[in-house]
Amino acid sequence: MSSLLVTALFLNVSCKNETKETTEPAEAAAATETGSAYKVDTQNSVIEWVGSKPAGKHNGTLSLSSGEISLNNGKVESGKFTIDMNTITVLDLAAGDGKEDLEGHLKGLGKEEDADHFFNTKKFPEGTFEITSVVTENGSTTVNGNLTLKGITKPVSFKATLLVDGDKLTLTSDSFTINRTEWGVNYASKSIFDNLKDKFVNDEIELKVSVTATK
């Protein structure tokens, strides 16, 4: 997975970008007949995440199960990626030291009544991200798209670096955040539940997307 982190890996990023506050997703961009299709290399593509609470934070990864980016005259004209929610992995805990418990909790694999606390992967095993536009201004590129989790689609925007080297394309985002409650991930949210005191989990999840694709 590390080959797609072109400018920086994991949490060593200098800029954090908030998602744009818009109410409705835009129409996904479509590929043209003259575009060149790049198929996502799922073994070398990753979404890194960080979740936090007053007592600390956890970080981990998610994998893509498929995806394709279309390029036309060196510019991205469309793209769609499928996220395998069953690949939620916690990296800051060791096996046997809470790692499996937290991964199961995030996936909703425990008690039936707790399945929807986070991502409920039994009911929603996949998420998707579809590009609606890619805008470059003053040397800065912004990727706009629709993120679907738990059957809910919301618009998301982030800064990214795009590099093309022959038949290989890499797309690496800056670190950005999403508000998980917009996708119905409400567990221990202070904005949803009263009287949590310091037993809450922050609504914001920090993400960094790194994709490698080839012709």
Image: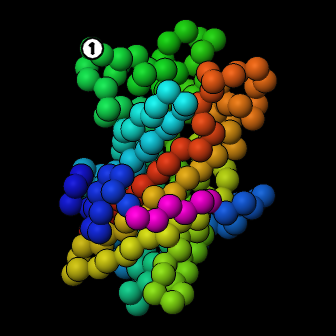
Quadrant containing the C terminus in the rendered view: bottom left
- Residue depicted at 58% across the width and 19% down the height: 115
Q: Nearer the viewer, residue 60 or 32?
A: 60
Query: Does any portion of residue 157 appear in the rendered image?
Result: yes
Location of residue 36 (image quadrant): bottom left
Image-based side of 169 in relation to 79, left or right: left
Query: Relative to 77, is 25 above or below?
Result: above
Query: Relative to 34, is 70 above or below?
Result: above
Residue found at the very far top of the displayed protein: 111
Q: Nearer the viewer, residue 61 or 177?
A: 177
Q: Position of residue 110 (x, y in %)?
A: 50, 12
Q: Position of residue 41 (x, y in %)?
A: 28, 57
Location of residue 34 (image quadrant): bottom left
Residue range of the region highlighted in magenta in the rendering: 14-19
Query: Does any portion of residue 151 appear in the rendered image?
Result: no
- Residue depicted at 60% across the width and 60% down the height: 18
Looking at the rendered structure, the kind of residue marked 1 is Gly
- Residue depicted at 71% across the width and 31% down the height: 190
The tally of labels here is 1
- Residue depicted at 48% across the width and 81% down the height: 140
Q: Position of residue 19 (x, y in %)?
A: 62, 59
Q: Is residue 25 magenta?
A: no
Q: Nearer the viewer, residue 169 or 34?
A: 169
Q: Position of residue 136 (x, y in %)?
A: 51, 84
Q: Nearer the viewer, residue 51 or 113?
A: 51
Query: Relative to 213, is 111 above or below?
Result: above
Element under disc 1: loop
Task: Return the residue at label 1.
Answer: 96
